[in-house]
Image (cartoon, helix red, strand yellow):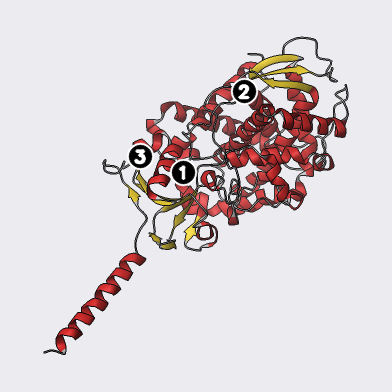
Amino acid sequence: MELIFPTVIIILGCVALLLLLQWKNLREPPCIRGWIPWIGAGFEFGKAPLEFIEKARIKYGPIFTVFAMGTRMTFVTEEEGINVFLKSKEVNFELAVQNPIYRTASIPKNIFFALHEKLYIVMKGKLGTFNLCQFAGQLTEELHEQLENLGTHGTIDLNNLVRHLLYPVSVNMLFKKGLFPTNKKKIMEFHQYFRAYDEGFEHGSQVPECLLRNWSKSKRWLLAFFEKNIPDIKTYKSEKDNSMTLMQDLLNVIETETNEESPNYGLLLLWASLSNAVTIAFWTLGFVLSHPNIHRTIMEGISSVFGTAGKDKIKVSEDDLKKLPLIRCCILETTRLRAPGAITRKVLKPVKILNYTVPSGDLLMLSPFWLHRNPKYFPEPESFKPERWKKANLEKHVFLDSFMAFGSGKYQCPGRWLALLEIETCIILLFYYYDCRLLDPLPKQSSLHLVGVQQPEGQCRIEYKQRKMTSSGAEEGKGLLEE
């Protein structure tokens, strides 16, 4: 009897230890559930996602789960978990984005899975660094056409200025020359519907369309726009060469599976090409104009490469851009500061991050916005310091460690190099032809968005004055965009 009792104690102790270890191994991250069934923390989270995440980080640490609208989202806000997010075979990108893409572009699940990888390969090849020279000429030409509408001087909201420059440039370059409207009324109509679609995109990706009347109307208008124009896009031929536009190449792939969803993919490409690039251009111009020393250095660099502003239309080449590295550094530093709140993967099988096990079915959310504020990788993380990018090997297209704004891994943003080229060229031409200054302080970033680049909270007016007469011979006076 004396021997049995200690033996029982030892066995029970081992069992308790085993259960404790098993519990510890299966311990899930702290979960913020809210109190309303299915909706969970949806209302509080949806009001200001970035503020919600910041408070949760302070309270629960770098890893936590939010239950909202029937979905579990596990956030990784610091470096822990990056390898799992990027390299684990137990997490999946396509499964994470399929439902949002169905809600925002009405692309059926079977079509999305059949086409996604094929279309990504086409875009990655077409928009890769070796092909950028094919876009440089048309990009400069299109920007010159839009700059002529500015007149000799004017005052306008900076965000609207960038939209008026880059909306037509991107549409005409990626879809077909002349697709963007030229009639003032139709231009304003396009702006109205695309802005409504873009501003409501995040809610549209999560909430049933029937609850979002204005957003749904903008979506239908844009789909009708592409349905009307897809036949012309397919038959378009460039006057200068036999090259095909990106949308034409995509249509060749899409139509191997379906002839019905071409407008839907047109809408998806439109949003992907305009939403983030336009906002980053806004912030970059705002940051540069808010830092006189940086602005002055850029202006001196532009003058050294292209001379003083004159009547000739300048052409911006790849070699020219290499002589002006500060501009790209400013764009990347802006992108770091205004990065997406989250990028996502679907957890297929439980994965372990630190001492937590993230269960299958969760959306694993990596936060570039917060990763970019880690002082270990980015000293003085809230400061605009483009000089930090001198440490990156940009000539070989290598970014700084822990820079995740374009995603990473297999499905890194395929349009990142074209977007950088577009913004660089826009800044060079605008500053070459115009003296610019901000009339308002740069607004704060909005805390309302988790998807995509952070939007400004308010307006910021810019005053521009032509430095010298351009080849358009524009008469002295205000531009067409004057507000």
Amino acid under disc 3 = Gly
State the SS at label 2. Answer: helix
The residue indicated by pointer 3 is 42
State the SS at label 3. Answer: helix
Up the image or down, 176 lies above or below 367; here it is above
- Residue 160 badge: 2
The image quarter containing residue 286 is top right
The residue indicated by pointer 1 is 100
Query: Residue at left 75%, top 39%?
Result: 326
Question: Looking at the picture, how far across and down is residue 97, in whole percent?
Answer: 49, 48
The reply to whether residue 255 is visible in this rendering is no
Question: Which residue occupies the foreground of this view, 213 or 149?
Answer: 149
CA gap, disc 1 to disc 3?
Answer: 16 Å
Please identify the quadrant where the C terminus is shown: top right
Amino acid under disc 1 = Pro
The reply to whether residue 430 is visible in this rendering is yes
Left or right side of 17 for 347? right
Question: Which residue occupies the foreground of this view, 345 or 52?
Answer: 52
Up the image or down, 283 lies above or below 206; here it is above
Query: Residue at left 73%, top 52%?
Result: 393
Query: Residue at left 76%, top 26%?
Result: 431
Which of the two labelled residues, at mark 2 and mark 1, occupies the earlier sequence position?
1
CA gap, disc 2 to disc 3?
Answer: 32 Å
Question: Looking at the picture, how far across and down is residue 52, in whole percent?
Answer: 41, 39
State the SS at label 1. Answer: helix
Left or right side of 407 for 366? left
Q: Are the residues tagged 2 and 1 within 8 Å (C-beta)?
A: no
Amino acid under disc 2 = Asn
Q: How many marks?
A: 3
Question: Which residue occupies the foreground of this view, 131 or 226?
Answer: 131
